[in-house]
Image: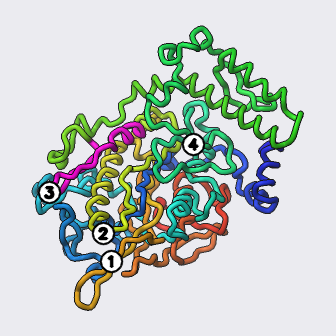
Amino acid sequence: MPNTSRRTLLKWALGAGQLALLDRAGLLGSSTAHAADVDVPSRLVVLYIPGGYRPAYYFTPMEDADIPLCVPTPSNHSGEPVFFQASQLVNLAPPNGSYKPLRTWQSWNPADPAARGNYSPLMYGYTHFALADQLSVLHGIDQGTNDHSSAFISSMCGVAGADYRAPAVHSVIANHLYEKYRESRPLPFVVVTGERGTPVGMGLPSHASPLRVPSIEALKPMLSAKPSDNPWWTGLDARTEAPELDVRGKPTGGTLKTTAIERFSLTRAQQLLDRSTAKVDNYLEGLHGSLSSVSRVLATDVVSVLEKTKGIEMMTSNRPAYLSSYLSNQSFTYTFGLANFHLTGLDSRMDMALRLLKADLCTSVHVSLQQDFDTHSGLGHGYSCAHGRGMMDNVARFLGELKAAPAPGKPGKTLLDDTLVLVMSEFGRSWASRSSDGSYYLPDDHHPYTSICFAGGNVAGNRQVGSYTTRGLGVPVDIIEENGQASKRVPRSADAVTTALRILGMEAHEFFIPGGYGEVVGLRKA
């Protein structure tokens, strides 16, 4: 059970009714993961594409007859081929049951996927790395808003608004798995980069809050245990292992290796409790929890572990042939165009995320993928098609790296088997429409309907669930509501978050999203 000061603070912030719902949902404290299914992943990665993307140009769920109504005539953008006809779409694998299989525009030359000019290798990565078996896409999600900040919050927690009314999915999972991995994963939730903002662990303990780790160098002043990085600690860095105590001095069930200074600091909060207000006690509790987390990180010597871990590995040691025409010294990039347009800068982000996962230091990771799609331009559709396919091919390479890496502590499993990867943006962008004379109207504004890719362990592969009308609106899908009843309606962001939590082994009663929520049928393995 949560302690009194924490309960009091939440009561002030949310009201007694909301507090009761959070208590019922088990969100007031970390729970011990109990899912027995070996396919349930133990990590979450969110790859975030800023600005609002157009996912139907990458994975296309519409019927063939509808494609000419909302996909412009094939042309080019900065020398890169864009747009497609229905006849150019290919399935990535045979259909999986009654669901539409993953299909995309075959912009590459099947005889030579590296060919350029009239061809484009972008999106070929999903075929090269054979990702269909562990990848599905949910289409037509209503974000409930078309404002950037509100939609970002909607993507993170399932509820649109100016502020978080539920914790971000990353924090929920970091909190849910904290007891199980507290000894081995000192960084429960890490944000590598976040152009549109940092996900918030609203109302959850400090261990579920994000830590920004953009680089190893950025960690050294704070968390390096090496005297060469922080010489002022020389002689004060000897650690003694003992049972971990909470802010009231009661054993938590874990152990902690602390220095003399840390042991003294951890006891001070208890000595100051109950001397002032509940707000002060809550603040002291937070300080104690944060210091315990920092102590665990320092004892783990995270900096040394990360320095010894290889991030981008397979992409450099066994570079895929279809990337032969790309910048040779970059693994996560793409080039196209008459001016040889190229995007670089993703390597450092992807490398940091891969190091964190391969070293088994964290449970939740958030990475922004840099390229912003908030274009508001007459060329916006071509930009979205060309750059979006380039960005999504980088996603395929990231998944390929996970698929090639063994899962720490799980023999026979890959890191992709033990990770749920979500690929998303805050919303979509305006859809094209064809007029009676055959020309296309190409608006480029914010659009509240979007898609999310689900990849990794416990994901039912090769499925496109949901779709879009020719105006870009979502269509009804099968949903199991939070009360267990079956329904059919357009999916909302809360349903997407719920589906992710269910794939990660949580039961519907173990979390709470204001406004109601349900699991979308067909994305989690039966």
Q: Quadrant of residue 234?
A: top right
Amino acid of disc 4: Pro
190, above or below 309, in the image: below
Question: In this view, which residue lies farthest toward the top?
Answer: 235
Residue 112 percent across, percent down from the top left: 11, 55
292, above or below 199, in the image: above
Q: Residue at x 40, y 46 (%)?
A: 416
- The residue carrying mark 4 is 210
**In this orientation, which residue lies closer to the viewer: 432 or 185?**
432
Q: Is residue 49 rendered to the left or right of residue 21?
A: left
- Which residues fall within the magenta stretch? 331-354
Residue 468 percent across, percent down from the top left: 40, 76
SS category of the residue bearing label 3 = loop
Q: Which mark is residue 381?
A: 2
Q: Does the stretch in magenta take in 338?
A: yes
Amino acid of disc 3: Leu
Amino acid of disc 2: His
Q: CA distance from mark 1 to mark 3?
A: 25 Å
Mark whose residue sits in front, 1 or 3: 3
Q: Are marks 1 and 4 in contact (CB under 8 Å)?
A: no
Residue 106 percent across, percent down from the top left: 20, 64
Q: Is residue 336 rendered to the left or right of residue 52?
A: left
- The residue carrying mark 1 is 432
Q: Which mark is residue 338?
A: 3
Question: In this view, which residue lies farthest toward the front?
Answer: 377
How many numbered marks are there? 4
SS category of the residue bearing label 1 = loop
Q: Residue at x 44, y 58 (%)?
A: 424
Residue 445 in view of the camera: yes
Q: Is residue 52 rendered to the left or right of residue 188?
A: left
SS category of the residue bearing label 2 = helix
